Amino acid sequence: MKNLIYSTKLLANKYCINEKKLERFLHQNKVPVIDGHIDGKYLPGIIDFVEQHNDRIDSFNKKEKPFYISNDKKISIYQNDAINFLEKLPDLSVDLIITDPAYSGMNNKLKFGKGRIVGKYAEKGTENGKWFDEFNDTDENYIRFLSQCRRVLKKSTGHIYIMFDSFSLLSLGPVVRKYFDVKNLITWDKINLGMGHYYRRRHEYIIFATNGNNRKIRNRKFPDVWRFKRIHNAQYPTQKPVELFQAMIYASAEKGFVVCDPFTGSSSSAIAAIKNDCSFIGCDISAKAVEISKKRIDHYLKFNEDILQKKSSATDNEIFWE
């Protein structure tokens, strides 16, 4: 079968790599360029080169204006829906995805009696009594979402953590295996009881997977049950503890990695990325969420203080990143 032919200009644009930098790489590695095109057999080497250069997020930020970007350019937040945001990101541009999609399935399928329904917060002054437009966790949406996650996640280093409640895990967990190599199912024990019409809930799940690679986590000491207290009386209704994301990042990231959260919410994941000396790119459809994120991140970078979570949520002996 004949190899495909690729335009160097289109490759540079696709991967957000400076065209001159790509040309130097091709010249140094004696890759023949004929009329601005190369043979497809050289593409794996180019991908290896692309994955070693983290300027693709900088290039993306220049093309797409973020809602918020830190002074050091390491943290950027966008207001957009998750899939549209991911579709615009360059290929192979992030090292780690950590995210907590909204759970519409639980709201639509299960009955809580008098229990509170996630997303309805009229008492907080939100439009139409809703804090955010839910990401409908249908097979169709998840297929689009996961395919884009796989495209933007690096092949050599890519790890992904996706949070699920019990209903969405049963209905959509198997879809993840079609796109990623699932390695573990982690249980988040929230210590304090939550809502529930039958058995009251005090846990959620996290699927940990890789993008076809065998890169290990930091070490094998980590348990698959994480005990971090849920956040009470939060300014953002679905706010997760920073320590939850710190555990993911510490286990899977190295200094300088690009961490991405397409459902960033109040940006607990961004605070965790800063604490682990990683770059971060996040997105949320909610105007309230990105405004909260901006204030929270800016304050933390200036004063090393988290205005939304004053105390650690970790229980004794549960901080395994120190």
Image (cartoon, grey):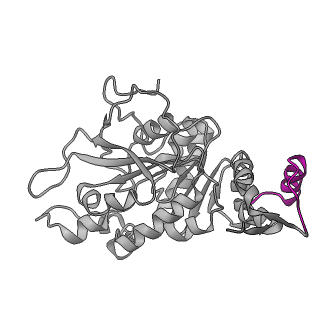
Quadrant in the picture for residue 105 = bottom left
Q: Which residues are magenta?
A: 16-34
Residue nearest the viewer, comparing 169 with 197: 169
- Provide residue 14's location: percent of width, then percent of height: 72, 65
Residue projecting furthest to the front: 1
Q: Compared to 274, does 261 lie above or below? A: below
Q: Is residue 283 left or right of residue 63?
A: left
Q: Compared to 240, does 222 lie above or below? A: above
Q: Residue at x 33, y 23 (%)?
A: 317
Q: Residue at x 54, y 69 (%)?
A: 80
- Provide residue 129's location: percent of width, then percent of height: 32, 72
Residue 227 visible in the snapshot: no
Q: Residue at x 18, y 49 (%)?
A: 201
**Residue 35 within the magenta-colored segment of the rendering:** no
- Provide residue 233's location: percent of width, then percent of height: 31, 49
Residue projecting furthest to the bottom: 128
- Provide residue 198's location: percent of width, then percent of height: 8, 55
Residue nearest the viewer, comparing 202 with 187: 187
Quadrant in the picture for residue 139 = bottom left
Q: Is residue 110 left or right of residue 218?
A: left
**Residue 17 within the magenta-colored segment of the rendering:** yes
Quadrant placement of the N terminus = bottom right
Residue nearest the viewer, comparing 272 with 151: 151
Residue projecting furthest to the left: 198
Residue 177 visible in the snapshot: yes
Residue nearest the viewer, comparing 297 with 168: 168
How many badges with numbers are in the image?
A: 0
Quadrant in the picture for residue 172 = bottom left
